[in-house]
Image (tube, grey):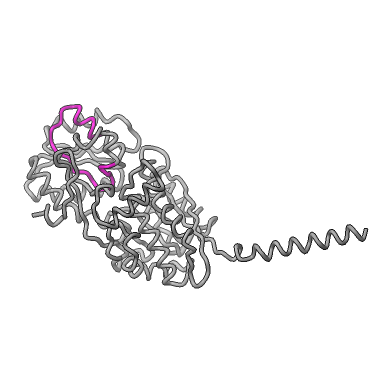
Amino acid sequence: MVIRRQFNQLATALALGGLLVAAPAFAQEVVKIGFSGPLSGGAAQYGKNTLDGMKFAVDELNASGFEVAGKKVRFEVVALDDKYNPAETAINFQRLVQEHKTPVVMCPHSGGGFAIQTTNEQMKTLLLSYTSVPQITERGNKLTLRIPPEFTTYIPAFVSHAMKKFGKNLAIANADHDYAKAWTKAFVPAWEAAGGKVVADNPMSYNKSTDFYSGVSKALASKPDVLFIGGASEPTGLVVKQARELGFKGGFVIIDQAKMDQMKPITGGYGPLEGAIGVLPMIDDTNAPAVAFTQRWLKANPGRDPSSEISLNYTAMHATAQAMKLAGSTTDAVAIRAQLDKAMKTLPANWNPNGLDGVDERGGSLADTRVAVIDGGKVKEMKLSELAK
């Protein structure tokens, strides 16, 4: 009996000792960052890219021993699939905030962002919105960061390049989701104001189909000089491939959701994209911070080139973490939002490969945007100001 009592006392002492040793680890604060985006269906790769960009930043932050208000912080990403459906986004947002206590939620599509904006201010949650539609910040939501610059900045250059190189007849063959509709609504008046004509209007369901021959054939029947296309990168690549197979010799204007480097494996190289204009692929960006980011990414993800979805969401996560540090809080969304401009402007260059310049008063990111045209089967980097002349 005495021996058993001594053994129990020793076991208790050892257990208490173990708890004392482990105490510093338990003192670490865990901050959960929410994600609701397409992880299945036609836009699954797009959703994965945005999510992986966040996770890459989180891995770096966790490895660095990140602190807020003198306390070590560990970030965790909680990801839910919304299948690109805003109704699912709204449900996911409630789950993320109520069940996982996420002070920040990222959504990579405008429809989902609008759904979140109906309640995020009341729920005191910061929305990181990966969409370039101006309306996401024009609504006046005070707890929103629009991660990429507004897509309207591309339009004058896209119109000028395509019309000068190929002609004035445009066929619309882009996706049919809200983001693509917003692009069409802004692009068509600019095309017509420059003397162009829309000869076909045939949007397609990029997220549900893998065969676009019928839709592309319908657009090509109007004999366009230029096809206005775009949605998730993989189906956009299929649209290009099938247009060329059907004999189309004209140009492509590609909305910024689609990335030419991710279309390249589908099209069989940049050759079928000859004359196309779109956003500059990260892998082809020659600026030093972009090159350094690409090298770090490829070391961790061999054989998988980083896209701008990856790099921009990487930067957004780093900026959000720095804003938490400046605010002295990981939970006060209002205070975190108030520090985002300063956080973005003071980010180390290697954490900001796309060169974002800050955040405006409405929550929109700022940048000196560069684009790419395919010339001779190669990417040619161009400034918007040069193309719009």
Q: Quadrant of residue 221?
A: top left
274 sits left or right of 109 in the view: left
Q: Can you say whether 123 is above or below 268 in the image?
A: below
196 sits left or right of 217 in the view: left
Can residue 321 be seen in the rendering of this structure?
Answer: yes
Q: In the depicted view, which residue is nearer to us: 118 or 104?
A: 104
Residue 180 magenta-highlighted: no
Q: Residue 200 placed where, x, y %?
A: 16, 37
Q: Quadrant of residue 170?
A: top left
301 sits left or right of 266 in the view: right
Q: Residue at x 36, y 56 (%)?
A: 129
Can residue 171 be seen in the rendering of this structure?
Answer: no
Q: Residue 356 placed where, x, y %?
A: 28, 61
The boundaries of the magenta stretch are: 239-261
Quadrant where the C terminus sits is bottom left
Q: Residue at x 28, y 34 (%)?
A: 266
Q: Residue at x 33, y 59 (%)?
A: 350
